[in-house]
Image (cartoon, coloured by chain):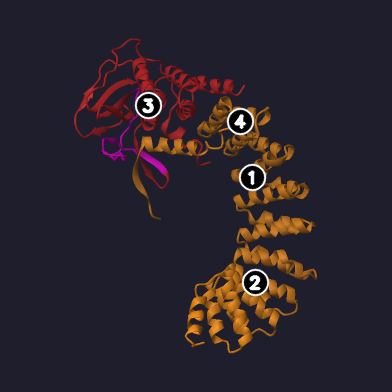
Chain colours: A orange, B red
Amino acid sequence: MKTFSRTIPFKALAATALIAFATQAPAQSEASDVEKLRIAAVEALISAPPERALPLARKVVEGNYSDELKEKALFVLSQIEDPEAQELILATARNSSGDLQEEAIRMIGIGGNPDTMAQLRSLFAEGDDDVRDAVLEAYIIADDEESVYQLALETHDEEAFAQAVEALGVMGAHDKLRQLRDQAISTGGEASEALIEAYAISGDLESLRALALETSDPKQQKQAIEGLGIIGSEQADAALVEIYRSAANEDVREAAIEGLMISGNDTAMLELYRASNEASEKRMLLEYLVNMGSEEVWQVIDQALEGDE
Amino acid sequence: MAPRGWIASSLWLLCATLAGPLAAAEITVGDDGWYRWDVAAGAGGRDACCYEFRGGKITGAVGCRLGHGEHDLAATGNCEVGSDSMQVFVEVKNGRVRDIRALSSGCPVSIAGDVRAVDDVSTADSIAWLIAQVDGSPRVAEDAIMALSFHTEPAAVEALVGLVEDTARRHDAREQALFWLVQTESDEAFAYLDRLLD
């Protein structure tokens, strides 16, 4: 392992703390002088010993203070490895509402305490869309794929399932997403729209290519093809060109072109244009190139003006 | 738990040294160059030094070189810096205070050029002079507030609280004073924070 070695002046170390301190200072222009000082005081607690910081953070979280101040105190608590601190954050996550509740949930993710994290499952099951999003964000912050997978498995709410699956996509959890698809198929279902979207978000080329070539469900096939465009990689674009060239029907061909447009690959589209001998197809591809605002399209126009095309 | 405790555990030790003598000659810095005085150190000042940093961790103090631009480079090998006193360095350039450093008296320091000694400086004088520098440029103000916090309690805490409560001062200076107040880890500092939240 490469070792980094240099001399850090004491002042630089202190300045690091000050910079972190200063970066959290904005958006306070409306606050009163006392409120500003309170915010600065609570922010400064982050570098205080836990036994010093905890009573003051508790005072803020449980007291009659602004949400902004309470959110700062929650962050301080999230950095304290003490059951009391975790309990305070959890109580706020359970008993408050709105932005403060969501912030408390996110702080549980930042703290990453496994016991507290486990309590988020009931909040996900009972909460509204915003609470569920906050819970999923907490799991994303904590990089806890397994818990999100379990949430997706356990929920009977279609919207909640879609949210969990999207989170797995954001986490790049290919294996978990494939397991969910296998699970759906084993119970007589199919890969849902949410799953296909998550494959695209996570960049799972293999799963999307398989679905893009599966002709039994045209709607699903179309979504998978367009998902390849969302991936936008060289391999995904190559798959789209291949699908376009071997398309058995116009819908598949159109989906492949849509995919290339989503990917923004005008070079591949221009190649298809040049390779085509059908006037209607060339016109369609040219329209796409124009709609993409492609610079490449000017090559075509210039050549047409010169009578080469 | 990266943010919490690394500064505190590595750089600040708990201590409760009383303030120095009540009366001393007023500090006067005039001509360009470096000045230095000794004063009793509080928790922050006892082991203030330049530290070697490896793999994200402080591995030892190595001493400081001052007057070499923004970067203080290593002077010599590892050393023990803990001391009940600290040395305050001040650089004057073009007739203005440009740099203030408070380092443990046990911290080896090398400076290019001569250093003028300021003798018989009391904690009260040192603090009063540093408070006056808070009106200077933001950078000098920052240096001065940090140096203030390295003095012995309760004098350092009282000075920092005075800055926090001085509504005529720039707000950033007051917030920095509050930050360094917390770093003193003194009972008085946390009692003050408790009152601030009432």
Q: Residues within 10 Å of mark 3 (few under 14, many from 20)?
A: many
Residue A185 lies in quadrant: bottom right
Amino acid type at image mark 2: Glu
Q: Position of residue B144 (x, y in %)?
A: 37, 26
Local secondary structure at mark 1: helix
Q: Give the amino acid type for the residue marked by disc 1 in the picture.
A: Arg
Q: Look at mark 4 in the image and give the residue it sits on.
A: A57
Q: Mark 4 vs mark 1: which is more N-terminal?
A: 4
The question of residue B182 being in magenta is answered with no
Q: What residue is at 78 percent from the left and 47 percent from the top?
A: A126
Give the farthest residue toward the front.
Answer: A305
Check disc 3 and report the residue beneath it. B144
> Tag 1 or tag 2, which sits nearer the N-term?
1
Pointer 1 with pointer 3, Cβ within 8 A: no
- For label 4, count other residues whose C-alpha is less than 10 Å away and answer few (under 14), some (14-19) or many (20+): many
Q: Nearer the viewer, mark 3 or mark 2?
A: 2
Asked whether the residues under the numbered discs 2 and 4 touch, taking CB atoms below 8 Å apart as contact, a structural biologist would say: no
